[in-house]
Image: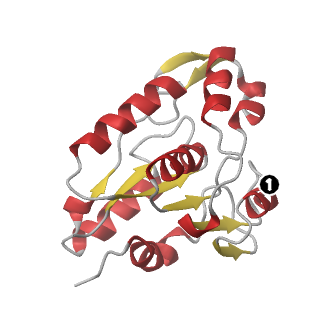
Amino acid sequence: MSATIVYLHGFNSSPASRKARTMDAYMRTRGLGRLFVCPALPPGPRDAVRVIEAELARLDSKPTFVGSSLGGFYATHFAERLGVRAVLINPAIAPYVGLEAYLGAQKNLYTGESYELTRADLDGWRALAVERPDPERYLLLLETGDEVLDWREAARKYEGARMAIRDGGDHTLQSFSEHLPRILAFAGITLS
């Protein structure tokens, strides 16, 4: 049985993000729409984990995570916890450090939802951190022009993993659509 792609979007993002919509459309046009899910993740880590766990409970196949930015951090947590694979797109390495500058009032860029980012959220992410991920589980997609996160931190953290590093680009991973066949192959999904 094929894996199901569980796409995890980033901080202040949603299933309406360009990458999530692109991957969904790519799979649907190939008759693979049933193998793609993208839950809307709440801003706080505890609630986000609950939503991901509920989504996993509905699957009838093994997940392969595709996580972008903060979604890559969650994907790492679940890949290690469940012993499955994950594709990480410009992943957040330590959101409990990087997002400290954003404490306070926030607004989701897609939904318009307002909320408060708190120290408890930072502590929640710290509790989910994986110190030494197994590089065999991962495919990293990085662009050196990422203006939000330093791609070199991800390359160091996941040393030994499969990686595609493109010069230029940005945090959104401009080259994303070029990687779709590679993502499906990594997940063990055969195109008909």
The amino acid type found where label 1 is placed reads Asp
| Residue 81 drawn above or below residue 2 | above
Q: Nearer the viewer, residue 77 or 179?
A: 77
Where in the figure is residue 82, as x and y percent of width and height?
44, 50
Where in the figure is residue 25, as x and y percent of width and height?
30, 64
* Direction from residue 149 to residue 44 in the image, left or right: left
Where in the figure is residue 143, as x and y percent of width and height?
70, 67
For the N terminus, give its image quadrant: bottom left
Where in the figure is residue 142, as x and y percent of width and height?
67, 66
For the C terminus, give its image quadrant: bottom left
Q: Residue at x 65, y 44 (%)?
A: 130
Q: Quadrant of residue 155?
A: bottom right
SS class, disc 1: loop
The residue labelled by disc 1 is 150
Does residue 118 show up? no
Q: Residue at x 47, y 62 (%)?
A: 85
Q: Which residue is drawn at 68% across and 24% down?
A: 122
* Direction from residue 94 to residue 83 in the image, left or right: left
| Residue 135 drawn above or below residue 12 | below
Q: In which quarter of the image is residue 164?
A: bottom right
Q: In which quarter of the image is residue 3?
A: bottom left
Does residue 101 show up? yes
Spot the residue most to the bottom.
Answer: 192
Q: Which of 91 and 15 is in front in this view?
A: 91
Q: Residue at x 77, y 32 (%)?
A: 97
* Direction from residue 108 to residue 29 in the image, left or right: left
Within 10 Å of disc 1 (Cα), the crowding (few <14, some 14-19, many 20+) is some
| Residue 34 drawn above or below residue 191 | above
* Count of numbered badges drawn on the protein: 1
* Direction from residue 39 to residue 35 in the image, left or right: left
